[in-house]
Amino acid sequence: MMRVTPGMKPYMIAAACVAAAFMIWLYANVDPSTTHIFPRCPVYVATGLSCPGCGTQRALHSLLAGDIAGAWEYNRGLFFGMPFVGALLLAYGLRGRMPRLYMALNSGPVIIAVAVLLTLWMVVRNIAGW
């Protein structure tokens, strides 16, 4: 594992920002449903079942195009998961200042709850045909 020195941190942050900006640009300008440059869901390819993340790429494209209803149709779970992912990223970034928040969000009960919710979402979306 690479050791991160204090002098490397600004470069790593800048690289992460450039990568994020590129991904935002890519998803805003390239429709995942009409091109083959984006990966296909291995769960869907192997089983024909929609996993909890199926439709996320198309939903992100729709969100970036301002089509909230379209994004909702592609993956309703994304709207519930985004705040949690945001909280995880915030807790990770502030883990030195707020270690209890970081530890709470990365605790066993939270991980189990997320796994249960994702499993339930997979079952519900396949039964309902979402």
Image: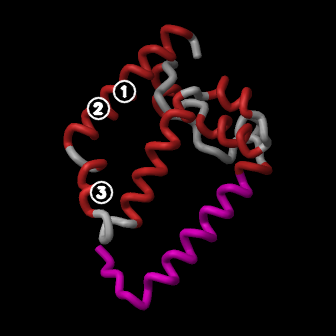
Near-viewer residue (126 or 81): 81
Question: Label 2: few (<14), some or many (≥20) within 10 Å?
Answer: few
Question: Label 1: few (<14), some or many (≥20) within 10 Å?
Answer: some
Which of disc 1 and disc 3 is earlier in sequence?
Answer: 3
Q: From this view, report whether residue 120 is shown above or below residue 4.
A: above
Q: Position of residue 16 (x, y in %)?
A: 54, 69
Residue assigned mark 3:
102
- Residue 117, label in figure: 1
Q: Secondary structure at mark 2?
A: helix
Identify the residue at horizontal 73%, vertical 57% (top origin): 25
> Could you give the CA–CA distance between mark 2 and mark 3, rounded to whole angstroms?
16 Å
Q: Secondary structure at mark 1?
A: helix
Residue 18 as seen in the image, left or right of residue 100:
right
Select label 2 or label 3 by which is in front: 3
Instruction: Report if residue 9 lies within the magenta region.
Output: yes
Kind of residue sitting beneath label 2:
Ala
Q: From this view, report whether residue 28 is shown above or below residue 110.
A: below
Residue 5 falls in which quadrant of the image?
A: bottom left
Would you say the residues marked 2 and 3 are in contact, meaning their CB atoms lie under 8 Å apart?
A: no
Q: Secondary structure at mark 3?
A: helix
Identify the residue at horizontal 29%, vertical 73% (top origin): 1
Q: Residue furthest bottom?
A: 7
Question: Label 3: few (<14), some or many (≥20) within 10 Å?
Answer: many
- Residue 62, label in figure: none
Identify the residue at horizontal 27%, vertical 40% (top origin): 111
What is the span of residues highlighted in magenta in the rendered image? 1-26
Which of disc 3 and disc 2 is earlier in sequence?
Answer: 3
Residue assigned mark 2:
113
Q: Position of residue 10 (x, y in %)?
A: 50, 83
Q: Magenta segment, principal secondary structure?
A: helix
Q: From this view, report whether residue 41 is shown above or below residue 101.
A: above
Kind of residue sitting beneath label 3:
Tyr
